[in-house]
Amino acid sequence: MSTVFTKIISGEFSGMFAWADEVCVVFATIEPISDGHMLVVPRQEVVAFTQADDALLAHLMKVAAIIGRAQEQAFEGSRAALIIAGFDVPHLHLHVIPAWGEAELTFANANGDATPDELTAATERLRETLRTQGHAANVPVEIGRPDLA
């Protein structure tokens, strides 16, 4: 059974992509805790991080660190935070969130009213920072498509 994330990756549902490689993609969540909140999602459907093999987990963590460094620069956060919860969608995903303190790191703070324009602007800001940090090869040509040039 395809998850909503599989449908975003395939293009059946829309998404705003900041990163793509052969193993995973990174796209904006529609309910960000802070501007620039991204999801690192494997292309392979894995229900939970405890079911992923070590190589996949290592790759996802490497990409999450790259995204986090870009967020720290793009959004001037004191840190990038990482949450692996997985209760909302049964497809492994890492939340990488620009953060200024632990108190804000709760899904109760998610902005369910974020507009498409706000999400696009935050994603483009991150995409540009990824390019300037030397990751242009992994920034999809189009924000709405997870394929590379």
Image: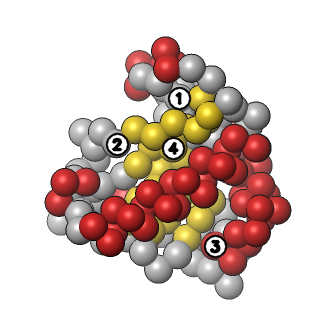
The residue where tag 3 is placed is 138
Sequence-wise, which precedes: disc 1 or disc 3? Answer: 1
Q: Nearer the viewer, residue 94 or 125?
A: 94
Residue 10, position as x, y percentages in the image: 43, 72
The residue where tag 4 is placed is 96
- Residue at 76% over, 69% down: 134
Q: Are marks 4 and 2 in contact (CB under 8 Å)?
A: no
Q: Which mark is residue 84?
A: 2
Sequence-wise, which precedes: disc 4 or disc 2? Answer: 2
- Distance between mark 1 and mark 3 Cα atoms: 24 Å
Q: Is residue 54 above or below residue 115?
A: below
Q: Is residue 68 above or below residue 35?
A: below
- Residue 16 in sight here: no
Badge 4 element: strand
Which class describes the residues within 10 Å of circle 3: few (<14), some (14-19), or many (20+)? many
Q: Determine the residue located farthest toward the top in the rendered image.
A: 103
Badge 2 element: loop
The residue where tag 1 is placed is 33
- Distance between mark 4 and mark 2 Cα atoms: 9 Å
2 to the left or right of 144: left
- Distance between mark 1 and mark 2 Cα atoms: 14 Å
